[in-house]
Image (cartoon, rainbow, N blue to C red):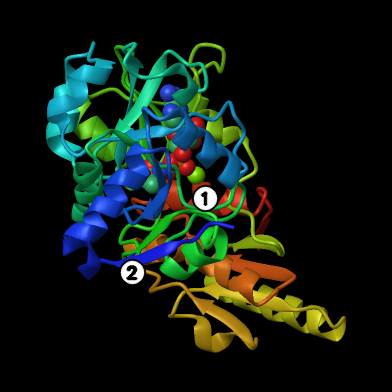
Amino acid sequence: MVNTRIYTLKDLDDLKVQEDIKISLQHGKNVVFPTETVYGIGANVLSQEGVNNIYKIKGRPSDNPLIMHLASSNVLDEYVYIKQDYVNKLIKSFWPGPLTLVFDKKTTVPNYFTGGLDTVGVRIPGSDIARKIIQIANVPICAPSANISGRPSGTLFKHVLEDFNHKVDILIDGGKSEVGLESTVLDVTKEIPVILRPGMITYDMISDVVGKVYISNEINENQIPKAPGMKYKHYAPKGKLMIVEGDPCKVVSYINKKIDFHKSNNQSVGVIITRDYKHLIHCDCIYEIGSADNEIEIASNIFASLREMDSKNIEYIYSFSFNQGIYSEAIMNRLLKAANNNIIKV
Ligand code: TXA
Ligand code: MG
């Protein structure tokens, strides 16, 4: 069992705390810290011990590469080749922020870090705290989402405690993650960039900057390396999650019938629903995810809603579908994975 130190954002001004973070990261220990997307479990990219620990602690498949986080794009050149002219436009438009760019890597990026790939994903987080941690460490930091592999990503400090207390040296409490979904992953090694994982930097936003963009599943799978992480079971709550899609009144009536059915079978049931329709559902366990017209709020609560169902040991979970609006690609990508593509159209 590890003696975990927990720090608040205020503690980060204390030089002793900064020293603890720096020494821990530089010497192959792990630090969980907030980013604007989700919490990340950090290690020094250049420490094989630190990187290996992450795979061990998360239970992460070893062929799933990690993202390198930098405090500024000034040092990007040390680690990657920038081959496409459009990359600088992307960097200007979206960094720091929730966009990971996949580049051809230089030999300064160790092979153990990229799961054997010749490419590396890099991101400059939008969160001041995340960049401060990287600056304190003074080394590039890898930070996969802070969750045990397969579980919903951590977006609240209580999620971090659930998964990593007594397993990791330092946990930093930064409150709720603002964005709530992991970064968009974009392959920029080719003439036309390819979205490997959708996120809050959307297809339209990228295309406005660079013109033509591909989405990975539109292309012959043999031609491009998809984000290896996308093939694994992801975000799954313990209970069975079903997405119900259609006219909201029909969705409400379908879910109410299901609630009666499960109750009569002594099964626990929970509902993930927008504020607008909450009052129409008769259920003891309701998670209010946000207003129907506020996708940003919905995105920020998706993972927390799934974790909340887990914490109440809910066996059957019904969720509204959030398939309209500019962020629906990112939101539904996570929700469909969590539901194992179980979608009911009414
Ligand atoms: O927002 C985020 O990106 C968060 C925060 C903590 O920064 N991090 C995160 O890391 O989501 P992770 O490890 O959970 O997800 C990284 C994704 C995986 O799907 C992985 O397969 C893909 O990026 N990836 C990483 N390097 C890649 C590469 N060289 N080529 C293709 N995909 C890559
Ligand atoms: Mg992840």
Image spot of residue 79 (x, y percent): 27, 19
In this rendering, position of residue 259 left or right of residue 138: right
| Callout 2 crowding tier (Cα within 10 Å): few <14, some 14–19, many ≥20 | some
Relative to 87, is 250 on the left or the right? right
Residue density around tag 1, few if under 14, some if 14–19, many if 20 or more, within 10 Å: many
Residue 270 occupies quadrant: bottom right
How many numbered circles does the render carry?
A: 2
In the image, residue 43 above or below residue 164: above
Q: Secondary structure at mark 1?
A: helix
Residue at image position (31%, 30%) is: 122
User: In the visual, does 205 lie left or right of 247?
Assistant: left
Ligand 2 closer than 8 Å to the CB at disc 1? Answer: no
Which of 135/285 is in front? 135
Q: Amino acid at mark 2?
A: Gly
Give whichever of 306, 211 is nearer the camera: 306
Whether 233 is drawn above or below 173: the answer is above
Residue 60 visible in the displayed image:
yes
Q: Nearer the viewer, mark 2 or mark 1?
A: 2
Give the amino acid at mark 1: Arg
Task: Check the image and name the residue furthest to the right.
Answer: 265
Kindly state the secondary structure of the residue where label 2 is placed. loop
Q: Position of residue 313 (x, y in %)?
A: 70, 74
Q: Which residue is mark 1?
A: 334
Q: Position of residue 39 (x, y in %)?
A: 39, 55
Q: Quadrant of the C terminus?
A: bottom right
Q: Which residue is mark 2?
A: 175
205 sits left or right of 115 in the view: left
Hey, which quadrant is residue 56 in on the image?
Answer: top right
Contact check, label 2 and label 1, Cβ < 8 Å: no
